[in-house]
């Protein structure tokens, strides 16, 4: 059975020469040299076209307890780990660094859309580590179709044949055993469970935009594991590291990669929600100030009349 994961996952096996990474000196402070993983940030401008930037990061397989960055002078790249909040913050920093730092301080201007993309490298890598690419958005219909096919391969109705299903880790169907033995495919039950979960993920694609707007709230959401498709985080060091184009060299690998595209613009949705409230608060403050001025002036007039009342009474008595 074909895996639910996108077909481009074979990229880690094809066009890849097994290599070993030399140990990183402990006194190297450069984050790019310390990180064991990376995420491709896909950007597009009128002047530079479509390009990707590799943002270094580190994801630990098992996270327990309080998550803190441990990139210090004595940590190794394969043992470092950091929180999702810090990763999103670094992605934002890379986005504004490429598209303009000054845009970060414009009111109601920022991330308006975050999309999962597939892309291929094309062209020569620039000196500023900008990878020219051709990209297209993740095909939600194709992903949904693959998920439904994976679910259909594992029957769950009441009239199924026991030889056609997998009951546990030790009892597999005939079709599953053939796929596991001959093609090194995962269990069809496991794939069906993953497919059911994957079908729900596109409903939460807007979560990616929310994560970039407020990175402090992203820990625990697992949004970096991928929403519509698999994770956009790749191994960049060690024997499992992906092949990357080198400056001024031809790159023949045509495998598709996954990345996140950040789009900047005026945040109309925030304006519609926040501006009316702020305008109401401003109007209320102006009204209160005006009322205080009126009361103060009225109190002054009454006080003046009160101070003059004995003289008026004396004049009336003289008449």
Image (spheres, helix red, strand yellow):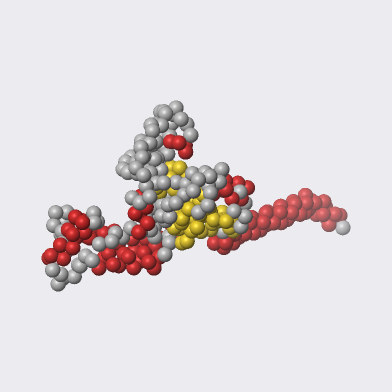
Q: Is residue 281 visible?
A: no
Compare residues 236 and 106 and report the one nearer the observer: 236
Identity of the residue drawn at 17% across and 54% down = 169
Work out which quarter of the rendered image holds the N terminus and state it.
bottom left
In x, y percent, where is residue 79?
A: 36, 36
Compare residues 247 and 319 and report the one nearer the observer: 247
Q: Is residue 91 above or below residue 195?
A: above
In x, y percent, where is residue 132?
A: 53, 52
In x, y percent, where is residue 37?
A: 40, 43
In x, y percent, where is residue 204?
A: 40, 60
Identity of the residue drawn at 59% across and 53% down = 48
* Residue that lies at the very extreme toward the right in this rendered image: 319
Horizontal relation, residue 107 to residue 40: left or right = right
Horizontal relation, residue 318 to residue 150: left or right = right
Q: Is residue 126 above or below residue 149?
A: above
Identity of the residue drawn at 41% across and 46% down = 243
């Amino acid at each position: 059975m074909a895996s639910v994961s996108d077909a481009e996952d074979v990229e880690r096996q094809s066009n890849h020469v097994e290599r070993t990474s030399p140990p990183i000196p402990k006194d190297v402070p450069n984050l790019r040299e310390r990180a064991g993983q990376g995420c491709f940030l896909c950007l597009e401008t009128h002047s530079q076209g479509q390009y990707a930037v590799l943002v270094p990061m580190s994801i630990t397989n098992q996270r327990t307890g309080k998550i803190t960055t441990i990139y210090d002078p004595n940590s190794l790249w394969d043992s470092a780990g950091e929180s999702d909040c810090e990763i999103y913050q670094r992605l934002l920093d890379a986005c504004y660094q490429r598209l303009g730092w000054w845009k970060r301080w414009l009111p109601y201007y920022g991330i308006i859309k975050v999309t999962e993309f597939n892309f291929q490298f094309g062209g020569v890598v620039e000196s500023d580590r900008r990878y020219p690419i051709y990209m297209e958005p993740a095909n939600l219909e194709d992903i949904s179709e693959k998920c439904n096919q994976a679910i259909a391969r594992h029957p769950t109705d009441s009239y199924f044949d026991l030889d056609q299903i997998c009951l546990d880790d030790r009892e597999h169907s005939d079709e599953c055993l053939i796929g596991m033995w001959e093609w090194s495919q995962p269990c069809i039950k496991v794939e069906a469970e993953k497919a059911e979960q994957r079908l729900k993920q596109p409903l939460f694609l807007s979560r990616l935009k929310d994560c970039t707007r407020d990175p402090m709230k992203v820990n625990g959401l697992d949004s970096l594991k991928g929403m519509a498709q698999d994770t956009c985080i790749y191994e960049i060091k060690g024997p499992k590291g992906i092949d990357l184009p080198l400056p001024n060299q031809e790159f023949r690998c045509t495998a598709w990669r996954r990345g996140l595209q950040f789009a900047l613009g005026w945040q109309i949705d925030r304006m519609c929600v926040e501006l009316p409230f702020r305008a109401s608060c401003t109007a209320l403050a102006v009204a209160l100030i005006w009322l205080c001025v009126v009361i103060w002036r009225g109190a002054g007039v009454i006080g003046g009349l009160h101070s003059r009342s004995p003289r008026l009474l004396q004049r009336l008595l003289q008449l």
